[in-house]
Each structure stands twice: as C-alpha cells, then as structure tokens.
Amino acid sequence: MKFGTKALHAGVFPDPATGAIMTPIYQTSTYVQSRPGDHKGFEYSRTGNPTRSQLEASLASLENGKYGLCFSSGLGAIDAVIKLLNSGDEVICTDDLYGGSYRIFTKIFEPLGVIFHFVDMADISNVKAKINDKTRLIWVETPTNPMMKIIDIEGLSAFTKGTDMLLAVDNTFASPYLQNPLDLGADIVMHSVTKFISGHSDVVMGALVTKNTELNERLAFIQNSCGAVPGPMDSFLALRGIKTLHVRMDRHCSNAAQVAYYLRDHKKVDKVYWPGFEDHPNHQVAKMQMRNFGGMISFNLRSDTQQAAHNVISRTKVFALAESLGGVESLVGHPATMTHAAIPREERMKIGLSDSLIRLSVGLEDIDDIIFDLNQAIG
Ligand SMILES: *Cc1c(COP(=O)(O)O)cnc(C)c1O
C-alpha cells in the first residue's frame, strides 16, 4: 500500500460490534473477564485500549515499522527511550535539539548518571569521534530545531549496525510522510504526535515505532510500568488527523517553499534556514533521505536584536505567536525567548541561534495571505 492509502486504512478496521467505520472512542478503564485471565485481549487501559491500539498500528505502518507505542506526550516517549539505559551509559545527541529534549537530558537524566554528549551531527565524523565502549544510544533530530540542519541517518546507522548501540531518530519535523528513519537503518523512531501527525493543534501526544520485537517488548514494559499513556479521546483525534497527513504535508511543503524564496529576497532578512535551498550545506542529504523539505523555516534579521525580532512577531496577523508547530494554522515563534529559552545564550550562539532568529511553522492558509502578512510584519 502507498502512503495515502495507509494513512486512511492501515491499522484501523470497522468496529466489530456495530460496523462503525470510524474507530470508536473506547472511553473505559477496564474490561470484563468471564473467568480470571479469560478476556478479549484487553485488561486495563494503561496496558492497552482498543482506540489506542488502532492508532499504534497505524503509526507503525506509516513508519514502515512493526510496532507502535503511544505516550501522553512527545517527552513521555523520549523519557521511555532513555529509561532503556543505566547509570554510566553514554548518549551522543544532536547539539541543536528541541529545548524540552535538552531539558530532560540535562536536568532529569544527567543527575541520575546518564552522560550526554552534544555534537554537531551535520558532519557525522563528529559523532564517530565521541563513540566509546560506554556509548549506548545515538539520539538524532533531523531537520534540527531551529537551525534546520540535516543529519545523515543512513551514515550514522553504519556506526550502530551490528553493535549494541541504538540509533533513535526524533522524526517530528519531517513526519512519516517525508522521512522514514527505520528504512535508513534507525532502531527507534520517535514522534511528537502533537505536531504534524495530529496536525490540528488539539492534542498533546508522543509515539515510538520499532521493528525489533525484543526492543518493542522492553519499551512496552516501560510504557506500562511508568504509565505515561494517552487517553482514548486523544487517540481518536490523532487517528482522525492521520487521515489527511499526506494532503496536509503537500501543502505545508509547497507553502513553505514559497515563503523561503520570498524571505531570501527580502532586504531586511539576513539568513534563511530551509533545507530545500540548493546551497543549504546538507541539501544533498536532504534530497536523499526526505521526499520534500517540510513546513518549517527559520530566518534572522539584518538588525540582529531580540527587539527587532519581537517587533516582527508581534505584528503578524495570519501567523499566530505561539509555541508548537505542525498545525493547520501558521505559527511564528522566537526560539531564544520561547522554545529554546532553557538553553544558555553562549550555547545558543555556538549553534548559530542568534537573538533575532524567528521560526515559522508555515500552515495551510492561502499563500498570498501568508506572504502579505510577512511583508507587512517585516516592513
Ligand atoms: C514538540 C517536540 C517534542 C516534544 O513533544 P511534546 O508532545 O510537546 O511533549 C520533541 N521533539 C520535537 C522535535 C518537538 O517539536
């Protein structure tokens, strides 16, 4: 089956009791047993719920995996992956990372003894240089947030294949429609389902997809033991979002491409970060591992101050000023004071995240209105 057909049909089936074509919201915590242990596959909704199961199967299929596990947020999913590790184990991760991932790594797991190395993975030889016999996990985000670097997943999988190191990819920015890390040799794909997959800014959720039975069993054990699971209503909303993922992504990509070229020609704009430009340093890798370049763009201003950025983002009318991304509506944010405020200024500067950097999640509005809005806001 091709992607659009899978988005509609994979993992889901008409309700056996009524024929309802839409997966019902099984709003129940428990399931009646006729005798102890004699049940219809579900015992308690932390462990398993039929609405969630269909969503997990759908996500597994979209990522060309075998197993899906859903969590109450993207960070809940990340938490489960790091809990595969022990004190003293080492992780190599992207330096230009989602702020919440940086926070859970450094503020929750570092004090428990897990060691994190943040490296610039745009050049994968930097990763190789950090690998030692304590390395257990390579954690990748690509495209990176907010600098839109592209990291060669297949190149990294050459380091982890046949070793006891795991390669995990946060695929939130690309979505499964544009990039399938398991096909490129990753062991675990992670999503903030909150973003493009749900797509309507009405759900907070996370997911993990794997192909490996033993790894899935360990992660499912953590999911059930720690209990960060989504409810059936949110699972229903995510399933509903998935049915239009391919259609939405095409428009996100085409709108973003037009915005990227528009910004690049603007006299008040300094640099535009978007992997679709032929002179983007990792454009060739992007073309190899992604089907299109996504809906995210960052840019900074020639007048490189926080004030200049705040002026622009306070004037937009189509773009709403908000955290998050990947919803149908266009959003604008200022990483230095919003999503990435937890990262110290010196660290931000090292990765090029300047004071005036503005991040756009380009939505599905008419492109003329999107450009008009940016034009009046940048001035
Ligand atoms: C939002 C996001 C997360 C965290 O997901 P939540 O659902 O907000 O917990 C992780 N990684 C990336 C790239 C994100 O954009």
Image (cartoon, helix red, strand yellow):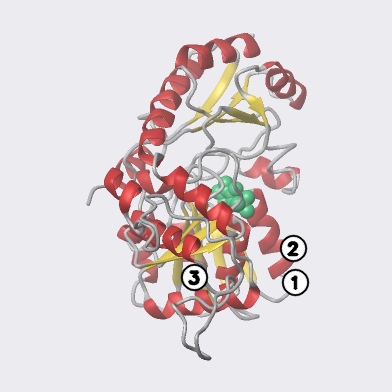
Q: Which residue is mark 1?
A: 111
Residue depicted at x 42% and y 38%:
281
Q: Which residue is mark 3?
A: 131
Mark 3 / mark 2, whichever is N-terminal: 2
- Using residue 149 as the reference point, say whether residue 158 is left or right of it: left
Q: State if disc 3 and disc 1 touch (CB < 8 Å).
A: no
User: What secondary structure is marked by label 1?
Assistant: loop
Look at the picture and state if 220 lies above or below 153: below
Q: State if disc 2 and disc 1 touch (CB < 8 Å).
A: yes
Give coordinates of residue 377: x percent, y percent.
65, 13
Give coordinates of residue 267: x percent, y percent.
56, 11
User: Is residue 174 visible in the rendered structure shown here?
Assistant: no
Instruction: Name the amino acid, label 3.
Output: Ile
Give coordinates of residue 22: x percent, y percent.
41, 50
Q: State if disc 2 and disc 3 touch (CB < 8 Å).
A: no
Q: Which residue is mark 2?
A: 107
User: Is residue 319 visible in the rendered structure shown here?
Assistant: yes
Q: Nearer the viewer, mark 1 or mark 3?
A: 1
Look at the picture and state if 348 lies above or below 191: above
Instruction: Name the amino acid, label 1.
Output: Pro
